Amino acid sequence: MNYYQHNIGDYAQATMHLTLIEDAIYSRLLRRYYAEEKPIINDLNQVCRWVGARLDEERTAVENVLNEFFVLDSENNVWRNKRADTEIASFHAKIEQAAEAGKKSAEARKRQRSLSDGSTGVKRKTSDRSSIEQQESNDRSTPVQRPFNENLTDAQLTKNQEPITNIKEKTNKKENSTGSDPADSPCVVSDFSDFAESPPEPAESPQPDNPVSTAGAIATYCRSQGIDGNPGPRLKQLVEQGAEMAHFVEAIPIAKQAGKGFSYLLGIVKNMLTDPPKARASPAKASIDSQWEELNKKLGVRNEAIDVAARVVNSPSEIRQDTHAALVRPT
C-alpha cells in the first residue's frame, strides 16, 4: 500500500500520553505495517533495527509500543494491529472488485463485437503478409514514431529529392454528344490548350436603376438643396411606389417655404403619389390661380356697374361712355 487513511483526531487521542520517542516508534511501525501489508515479526532486535532504536531507552520504548498497540499472534509469531489489518483487507477487497468489474466489462464488449460481426458478416482476417508486418512495426513503435509510420506513402521523399511541380491531375466531367464519358480517369496535362481564353461574353443590357440607387440620388439632391436627407426605408418605399426625382424637385420649395425638414418633404411626395392633381400644384400655379380669381372678382363688380348704368341711362351714347368709364376706372 502506498497510501492509507490517517485520522489525525483518532491518532492524537490514542497517542497523546506517549513520549516523543514512543510516538516516533509507533509511526514508523505503522508505516512499515502498511507498506509490507503484513504484521510485525516477533523479533525485538529486528524491530529495533527497523525503527532505528539503538539505546536501551529506545529499545524499552519499542517494547512498550508493541505491548500497548499491537497484539501478539503466538500461532504465527507476529505482532498484529487491528486497525491496520482492517484497512489492508478493505484495500484488497477494492482491488478484487475493480478487477472483477474490468473482466465483466471486457466480456460484454467481446460479446457485443461477436454479435456485430455475426449480423454484418464481417470476417476479420488479414490476407496480405506485408500488412501484418507493417502493423507489427507500428505496434512496436513509440507514440512519436507511430503517426509517421502510419502515413507512409509508396514514394518516400528523401532529403535531397526535388518536389514535383510540373504534373497536374484533372478529371473531365463533361459528357460527349453520345452520352458517354471517356475522360473520367485522371490524366496528365501535356499542353495549355485547356487554359486558352474563352471568347468574350456578350455585354449585358443596362438594367434600370434599382430603388436603392434612385433613393441615394434623391437623398444627395435633397442635401444639395439644404434639406438633410438619407436613403432610409421610407424613401426607398416611396421610390418603389413610383416616386421620381421630379416629385422632389417640386416638393422641396414647398418644404423649405414651410421651414420643415426631410420627414415633411417625404409626406408631401407621398401626397403627390396618392392625389397627384392636388399635390402637384406648384407655388407658381397657385399664384396664377389666385390672380385669376382676383380678376374675376373685379370683372363681376364692373359688370354690375354696367348693368346699373344701362338701366338708368337710355341713350346708347351715354351707355357707351359709362361702360368705357367703368372699364378704365380702378376699383
Image (cartoon, grey):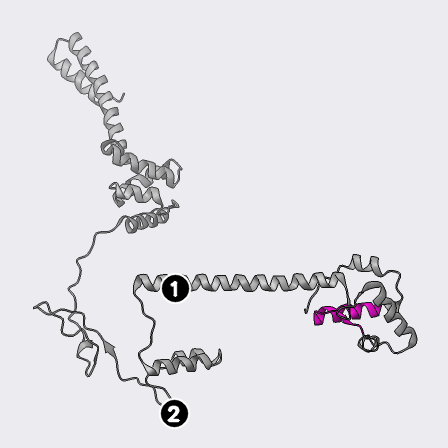
Looking at the rendering, the stretch of residues picked out in magenta corresponds to 23-42
Hey, what amino acid is under mark 1?
Answer: Arg
* Residue at x-position 26% and y-position 83%: 167
- Please tell me whether mark 1 sits on a helix, a strand or a loop: helix
Q: Residues within 10 Å of mark 2 (few under 14, many from 20)?
A: few
Which residue is depicted at the point 18% across and 76% down? 194
Residue 42 badge:
none
Q: Indicate which disc residue 113 carries.
A: 1
Q: Residue furthest front?
A: 75
Q: Position of residue 142 (x, y in %)?
A: 49, 80
- The picture places residue 115, in percent across and down from the top left corner, at 36, 61
Please tell me whether residue 277 is drawn above or below residue 237 in the rendered image. above
Mark 2 = which residue? Answer: 160
Q: Is 262 on the left or on the right of 19, as rendered?
A: left
Give the amino acid at mark 2. Asn
Please tell me whether the stretch drawn in magenta is mainly helix, strand or loop.
Answer: helix
Q: Earlier in the sequence, mark 1 or mark 2?
A: 1
- Please name whichever residue, 278 or 325, is drawn nearer the observer in this view of the structure: 278
Q: For the residues carrying marks 1 and 2, which lies nearer the camera in this image?
A: 1
From what the image shows, is residue 172 above or below residue 6?
below
Front position in the image: 12 or 76: 76
